[in-house]
Image: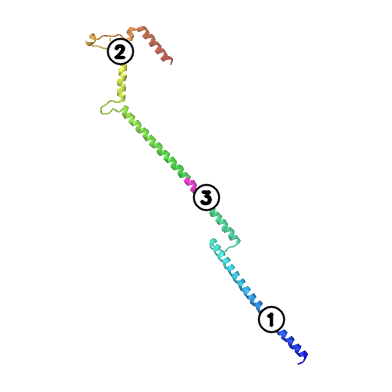
């Protein structure tokens, strides 16, 4: 074999080896790209599933496909429901306050009614005690009338004495006494005139 043939064989062998190395590198690159795309597809599929789940949940909440307008409508409806609940709470608070005030007034009316009934019972007891005679005693009114009659009798005796009051045979044996009019007629008339003038002036 000549030198040229040997050099050509060596060059061919090197080219074959280089081609083999390039082929192996290309296969490795293909396998790496396939694995990378598979991993990317796996992560992308997970993200899509999560996004789809969120979208489906949101769509179930709002009842239709979600867009920007749908999101704004959903938020507006949520705020409206919240405001309605606030108004309901205010109505309940107002109702509770009115109920408390009515109960308070009702209790005051009950207390006043009981107080009036107690006073009426006291008046009935006073009437029975002073004006309604019992089974074995006279009433206070009758006792007062008796006392007034006795006072009037004593005043008559003081004024006129016992001369004109006692009549009959027994009066002859009694010690007759003169009254103020007979003993002091001038002073009595002056005093009576002063009393009459005072009553007229008043």
Q: Which mark is residue 157?
A: 2
Classify mark 2: helix, strand or loop: helix
Instruction: Name the residue beneath numbered marker 3.
Output: 87
Neighbours of disc 2 within 10 Å: few (<14), some (14-19), many (20+): some
User: Going 58% across and 60% down the picture, which residue do you hit?
Assistant: 71
Classify mark 3: helix, strand or loop: helix
Instruction: Pinpoint residue 111: horizontal percent, then vertical percent.
Output: 40, 38
Magenta region: which residues? 86-96
Q: Mark 1 and mark 2: span between their CA atoms?
A: 166 Å
Q: How is the image coloured?
A: rainbow
Is residue 147 toward the left or the right of residue 102 in the image?
A: left
Main SS class of the magenta portion in the image = helix
Q: Which mark is residue 143?
A: none
Name the quarter where the N terminus is drawn.
bottom right
Instruction: Pinpoint residue 59: horizontal percent, then vertical percent.
Output: 55, 63
Name the quarter where the C terminus is drawn.
top left
Q: State the residue in front, 193 or 131.
A: 131
Label pair 1/2, CB-CB below 8 angstroms: no
Instruction: Name the residue beneath numbered marker 1.
Output: 21
Question: Which numbered disc flags the more N-terminal residue, 1 or 2?
Answer: 1
Is residue 143 toward the left or the right of residue 108 in the image?
A: left
């Amino acid at each position: 074999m000549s030198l040229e043939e040997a050099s050509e064989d060596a060059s061919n062998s090197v080219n074959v080896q280089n081609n083999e190395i390039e082929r192996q590198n290309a296969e490795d690159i293909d396998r790496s790209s396939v694995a990378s795309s598979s991993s990317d597809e796996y992560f992308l599929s997970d993200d899509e599933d999560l996004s789809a789940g969120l979208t489906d949940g949101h769509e179930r909440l709002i009842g239709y496909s979600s867009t920007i307008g749908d999101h704004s409508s959903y938020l507006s409806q949520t705020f409206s429901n919240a405001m309605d609940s606030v108004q309901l709470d205010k109505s309940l608070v107002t109702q509770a306050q009115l109920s408390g005030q009515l109960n308070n007034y009702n209790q005051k009316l009950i207390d006043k009614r009981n107080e009036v009934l107690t006073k009426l019972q006291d008046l009935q007891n006073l009437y029975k005690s002073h004006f309604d005679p019992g089974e074995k005693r006279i009433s206070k009114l009758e006792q007062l009338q008796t006392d007034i009659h006795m006072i009037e009798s004593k005043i008559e005796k003081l004024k006129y004495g016992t001369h004109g009051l006692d009549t009959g045979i027994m009066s002859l044996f009694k010690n007759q006494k003169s009254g103020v009019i007979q003993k002091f007629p001038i002073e009595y008339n002056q005093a009576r005139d002063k009393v009459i003038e005072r009553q007229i002036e008043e």
